[in-house]
Amino acid sequence: MMSLPHRLDRTVTIRAPRESVFRFFTDTGRWAAWWGTGSSIDPQPGGAVRIRYPEGTEVSGEVIEIRAPEKLVFTYGYVTGKPIPPGNSRVTILLEDNATGTILHLTHEFADAGVRDQHVQGWRFQLSLFANAVANEVHASTAGAIDQWFNLWSVADEQERQKALAGLAAPGVSFRDPYGVLEGIADLTAHITASQRFMPGMRLERKGNVRHCQGTVLADWIAVTSDGQQRASGTNVFQFGSEGRLEAVTGFWNR
């Protein structure tokens, strides 16, 4: 390969385990999920890399190095030869464990500074698509988890509720709304017990579909009495950790 003195560097944090992120480099279906239909990768040294952007632009390359679950290096060039001939640039992706998930470090090396500059926004956009593709897979079951959260507010047995919360949320889960500033499962369990005493027979229900982005989920809710009357409504913001457990909930009430 020719000299590649010009670098483009970008770092993003993805709320997913490193192993979950890396499998998007070893599976053609997942590879295509963030590049475009028709893209593929043969995940071994010398294996072919194919990228087909949604508007039809095609890139070809070759895997230079792959080491699970932390590193992928491949060449990158356009099938047309412009602005980069096949084999005439190199992409290195490194994955680093982080408390919030995975830090992805990308370096794209070029022969020409002007061509490098043309790719800055492209990588900004493409890595955003990638982070969302990974997060959407890791957090695919958030709707069910949120339904479980709302159902827990009607569970009468405190021990049963605390056990269910332990399976759903992180030990230090925080909860904020106009009537609660809470930290931890034990505090939250006691708060729910009190809410049942002051609002007997009330149950919470999700209203409509959840909206998810990067482990943050918005869900509308209603509070309904035992005779089916709606007494309150609002929206909750749920924050899921990289392993899919609830870390924080913030509740907004409609006034």
Image: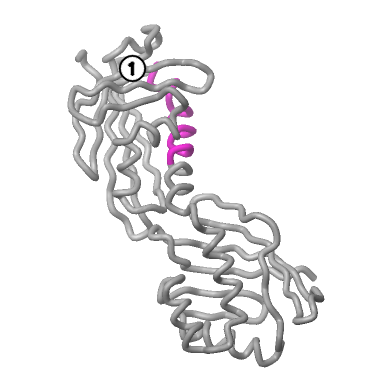
**Residue 58 vertical placement versus 171 (above, below):** above
- Going by the numbered disc 1, the residue's amino acid type is Ser
Q: Is residue 18 above or below residue 172?
A: above
- Badge 1 is on which residue? 60
Q: Position of residue 211 (x, y in %)?
A: 61, 52
Q: Is the magenta region chiefly helix, strand or loop?
A: helix
The image quarter in which residue 62 lies: top left
Is residue 166 visible in the rendered image? The answer is yes
Residue located at (37% from left, 13% from top): 78
Q: Residue 179: x percent and y percent?
A: 66, 81
Compared to 50, does 250 lie above or below?
A: below
Q: Quadrant of residue 63?
A: top left
Q: Which is nearer the eye, 173 or 110?
A: 173
> In terms of image quadrants, where is residue 105?
top left
Can residue 124 be found in the magenta stretch? Answer: yes
**Who's the residue at 65% across and 88% down the image?**
196
Q: Which span is picked out in magenta?
A: 114-130
Residue neighbourhood size for the residue with mark 1, other residues' Cα within 10 Å, grouped as few (<14), some (14–19), many (≥20): many
